[in-house]
Image: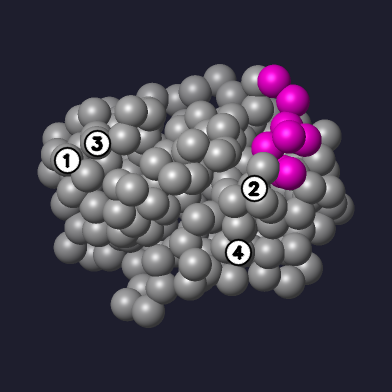
Amino acid sequence: MNHYNRTRVKICGITRVEDAVSAVNSGVDAIGLVFYAQSQRFVSVGQAQKIVAAIPPFVSVVGLFVNALEAEIETVLSKVRLDILQFHGDETVTECEQINLPYYKAIRVKADTNLLQYAVEFSSAKALLLDAHTESEFGGTGLTFDWNLIPKSLTKPIILAGGLTVENVEKAIQEVKPYAVDVSGGVEITKGIKDAAKIAAFMQGVSNARA
């Protein structure tokens, strides 16, 4: 597994302009917008447009979709500028590739998940996002998974998600050495509402892991 000089950070589930600005000011590399209506962090196209308008250059905007139809995604893309797509459901490679944008695939990891097989199957993905597995929800659960389940020989860039917080991000980076970390609930006051102080502390934890 590659060890990158700098661990990138994405803050997902942004629903307010001020939270996007806090994230950018803290030095994040990407923000995530959730276009999945059943999520408590869902954003409408109108909200998304306002948030994207506040994002300066060199910060990526990620659109998260769960088992969405191609037409639904294209409708969002016709109105909102997204840099990369995050497929967080049970999408096939063909479904991920049918949109003309780079993408990465979220995988909910459990004991029998064959990540090496996923890396081969989703070879066109820019990265694999590894999240905790639950039967009830597609991510954003606040649960961590056993990081020892990640094979050391995985060559695909890893975005580590699932229950990351100010308290555990440093340990997570030191153990997994991911390309990036992805946090949502770990920097929130309540679902969808971020805490600027927690974002800053999380970013400090990321920096400390590299020191």
Q: Nearer the viewer, residue 157 or 34?
A: 34
Task: Give how far across and how far down residue 160 sits, in percent.
Answer: 46, 46
**Looking at the rendering, in which quadrant would you find the C terminus?**
top right
Select label 4 or label 3 by which is in front: 3
Determine the CA span between mark 4 and mark 3: 25 Å
What kind of residue is marked 3? Gln
Which span of residues is magenta-colored?
50-57
Mark 4 = which residue?
41
Mark 3 = which residue?
98
**SS type, badge 2:** helix
149 left or right of 6 in image: left
**Looking at the rendering, in which quadrant would you find the N terminus?**
top left
Task: Look at 47% across and 50% down and name the residue there.
Answer: 64
What kind of residue is marked 1? Thr
Task: Give how far across and how far down residue 72 sits, in percent.
Answer: 38, 52
N-term mark: 1 or 2: 2
Can residue 159 be seen here? The reply is no
Determine the CA span between mark 2 and mark 4: 12 Å
Task: Give how far across and how far down residue 45 sits, in percent.
Answer: 59, 51
183 left or right of 123 in image: right
